[in-house]
Image (cartoon, helix red, strand yellow):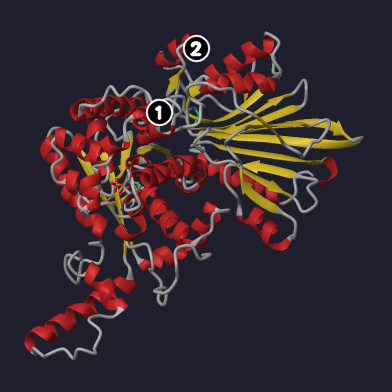
Amino acid sequence: MCGIGIAIAPASSAHDHVWPTVLDAIRRRGPDSLRTFHHHFTAHSQPYALSLASSVLSLRGVGITAQPLASTHGRLLLAWNGQIFDTVDGASSSRVRLDAGENDAQVLLDRITTLVDAGSGCEQAVNAALAEVEAPYALALLDTHTSTLVFARDPLGRRSLLLHRSPRHEALTICSVASTALLDSIANDPGATLDEIDCATIWAIDLLRSPTTPRALPRCQSRFTQPLLLRELRPQQPASTEDDFEAARDGFLAVLADSVQRRVANIATDQAAGEAHVAVLFSGGLDCTTLALLAHRYVPAHQPIDLLNVGFENPRALAAARTERQRKARASTEPRRRNKHQPASTPLQDDAAESAPELGGEEDIYAVPDRLTGLASYAELRRLAPLRRWNFVAINIAYDEYTRYRSQVATLMAPTSSVMDLSIGCALYFASRGAGLLGTELYTTPARVLLSGLGADELLGGYSRHRHALSSGLCALVDELQLDLHRLPTRNLGRDDRVISTHAREARYPFLDRTVLDYLTSTPTTTKINTDLLKAGQRGDKFLLRKLAQSLGLVQASRLQKRAMQFGTRAAKIDPHSGAIKGHHKA
Ligand SMILES: Nc1ncnc2c1ncn2[C@@H]1O[C@H](COP(=O)(O)OP(=O)(O)OP(=O)(O)O)[C@@H](O)[C@H]1O
Ligand SMILES: NC(=O)CC[C@H](N)C(=O)O
């Protein structure tokens, strides 16, 4: 992923010690180029300076399209962290150019320039151009003629953009990710703030009038920007073309496969043709295994697909497992009647009981639940696609290594800061670093594109809270699913982008493609979820996806139960005495 950094401040105070640290942080996200453009203006009779920096992780077009990218006469400057995967039908010239392999930043800037040349203000032009594309993005556009800055994130918030205000709001920093110096300012200067930029609207700053006060602009409506509403909650429910379950499953397969194809095709890098261009963040669970098998259809046959599977040495869980094994061994050699007042097990024993059967043996400290599932699904992929080179990369993170990197991950994920965020952030940090064992050899994935299965649980009812909601009736389940859709932009995606992109890689989310979202929000809830099975505590969750996976031959993976990343990797409750700490506590 690329990076964006913008500083707006009175000229006298511009470029303090924080700005170089912001540049460092965004350089890591986009190692292929980094440019900075300076714009000077006067507001309230005071000279001001704006610096606009943009780094590029080049994935589209011929060569590297450096940013900020200038329009022909230099009036407009674009910083684009994004990938256009689809365009509305009306934008046919953009579509043709993208299909021909042109760089999407250039195509987008040309479209904005055309609208500005035809008389639109730059805010309207950006707004209209963004409504024509399906893309994860964070963007900033500076109009040097009018001294207007426009910035935005895609409606689902798949790319990060943060806003930092100085204590008296006289200066503003907009950046993909925070640096330690920026966080120090939050800690030390009362009044300083750091927030994720809201992606429901587009933002603009009229630099000459109010240089540090963004204004919200409602988004232009299109099929890519309309709010997502489940069919059960629409005033008029669409006629159900998918009464037939098999037709619904096949329709889902068609849109999901197409989404995967668009995310793995046309990756233009200077990599050797025969090395992996695509890796899967691979727990071995249902969601990512299905994506891996679909990716196999479209990734060139001579390229390997890397499966990145992370697991942590968790001293607490290991100690508990050992104690539990010893207890069981003692119990089997000295059978004793349990006193009825003695509790069946302690919380630590419960934890161990969960670990014990899943740890492959005392010595295999990385045989965490996701490793075992990962290996099983890897075997299934090899069986179904034997001619593909699948690289199962075992990413083993020792407790020492985790403790060395923890504060770095905490800085990257800011302003999110809970214990659960840190566990997930660490799992994603190491998984996307992509360095582990390929067999017995050390290996680091060269892939810049990482597929993630995130989104399937929100769309298809994969969380245990969906089952709890169903116990209050179907309407409660529908409401819970709608809430998930509503919260997608604010929950995890910004955090994940900040953590993953620091390794100069880009996460792509096939389940969050707009056409997939439209399809699944139009499919009846009772088709997506088998409510009878779910009520009975069986595999009724993500039922449509389970059946899709089965139809592809993924028999083992289609039966897997959801396991949250922090538990599957054993990144949660890893520190001594962390047993009583709750996920929502501050890390
Ligand atoms: N141990 C892991 N190693 C690498 N990537 C992982 C791991 N665990 C989860 N991921 C990635 O994060 C995504 C979202 O994780 P989440 O905890 O929501 O799992 P999930 O919904 O059960 O998905 P899946 O069925 O793919 O495991 C996964 O689809 C996968 O791409
Ligand atoms: N990774 C990015 O967001 C870079 C921008 C552009 N899509 C490119 O590939 O060059």
Asked which secondary structure carries label 2, the reply is loop
Task: Tell which circle, 2 or 1, labels the residue nearer the N-terminal end.
Answer: 2
What's the residue type where badge 1 is placed? Thr
Residue 315 position by quadrant: bottom left
In-image side of 342 versus 469 (left or right): left
Taking the spot 29% from the left edge, 46% from the top edge, the residue there is 282
Q: Nearer the viewer, residue 354 or 68?
A: 354
Asked which secondary structure carries label 1, the reply is loop
Q: Nearer the viewer, mark 2 or mark 1?
A: 2
Q: Residues within 10 Å of mark 1 (few under 14, many from 20)?
A: some
In the rendered view, tell whether residue 333 sits above or below residue 149: below
**Residue 250 shows which numbered tag?**
none
Taking the spot 38% from the left edge, 55% from the top edge, the residue there is 427
- Tell me if I can see residue 548 in this picture: yes
What's the residue type where badge 2 is placed? Ala
The percent position of residue 166, horizontal first and vertical second, equals 75, 50
In the rendered view, tell whether residue 72 sits above or below residue 455: above
Q: Nearer the viewer, residue 74 or 166?
A: 166
Residue 575 position by quadrant: bottom left
CA distance separating discs 2 and 1:
26 Å
In-image side of 109 versus 563 (left or right): right
Q: Which residue is mark 2?
A: 91
In the rendered view, tell whether residue 159 sits above or below residue 334: above
Q: Which residue is mark 1?
A: 269
Judged from this view, the residue extending furthest toward the right is 45
In the rendered view, tell whether residue 402 sits above or below residue 496: below
Taking the spot 19% from the left edge, 89% from the top edge, the residue there is 340
